[in-house]
Amino acid sequence: MNEQTERAKARAHYAAAAVGGFLGLYPLVSAAHILGSAQTSNLIEIVLDALLGNVQTCALHALGALIYVFSITLATILERRTKINLKLLALIFDFFSAVCMFLTPPSLPVPIYLYPTFFALPFHWCAFKGAYGFVSATIFSTNNLRMFVSAVAEITINGDRSFSTKAFFFGFTLLFYHAGIVFAFVFWKIFGSAGFLFSLIPILICAFFCFFGTNNYGK
């Protein structure tokens, strides 16, 4: 890809990170209090429930893991075997997951409350993979933080300026991810669970950068 296309891809990636941050906040501040973007906590819960003999809860967490796996599998198949625009479909799934989270009663068991994000966000991750040749998650921060810190260390300590693009890319991904969290928190404080629905704003911004940022990017 040329430089213009890579810049457009990066802008779409930053906007996608903001969407990931927005949708990632709500399970933490609402009934679930668990990150719905990743599986680490959910997989630990499966093991703990199995060890403690909590069969029903273990099954609910296991179903959540299967939903996560199914979403990744679906995205992989659609990308390889169809001409469906994965980014557009991911953004549609994002908004419908927000609607589902808004409509889901907080009284339901925690794993069920997480199911919408367990489906939408891994699909989102598969659709928005990175830019400038870097692989970057748009739904959680750990590896982005590692890559950003290592790049900054290469520049400041080892004096290697060739890591500048890497530092800027992962730095801006972290910035926009957490901007999405701030944006979501404000709407949650004002509107409660109805704040989910305002995810449409970053979703539309992301769609704009995907499909109108340049004539060469959007697939």
Image: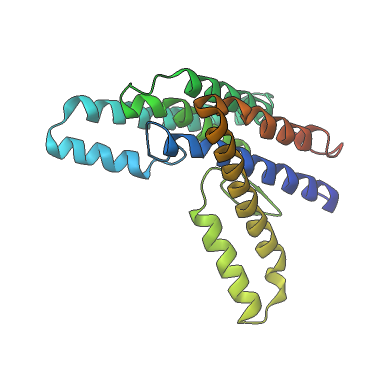
- Quadrant in the picture for the C terminus: top right
On screen, residue 85 versus residue 39, left or right, reads right
Which residue is outermost to the bottom?
158
Residue name at image x 59 percent, y 75 percent:
153
Does 135 sit above or below residue 96?
below
Colour mapping used in the image? rainbow
Q: Position of residue 120 (x, y in %)?
A: 52, 29
Q: Position of residue 189 (x, y in %)?
A: 53, 35
On screen, residue 115 versus residue 209, left or right, reads left
Of residue 56 and residue 186, the one placed in the foreground of this image is 186
Residue name at image x 53 percent, y 33 percent:
188
Does 187 sit above or below residue 18?
above
Q: Position of residue 12 (x, y in %)?
A: 72, 42
Of residue 96 and residue 69, the one placed in the foreground of this image is 96
Of residue 165 and residue 16, the one placed in the foreground of this image is 16
Please say whether residue 219 is visible from this viewpoint: no
Quadrant in the picture for residue 198: top right
Which residue is outermost to the front?
190
Quadrant in the picture for residue 169: bottom right
The mark total stands at 0
Q: Position of residue 156 (x, y in %)?
A: 64, 79
Of residue 163 and residue 178, the one placed in the foreground of this image is 178
Please say whether residue 213 is visible from this viewpoint: yes
Residue name at image x 58 percent, y 39 percent:
186
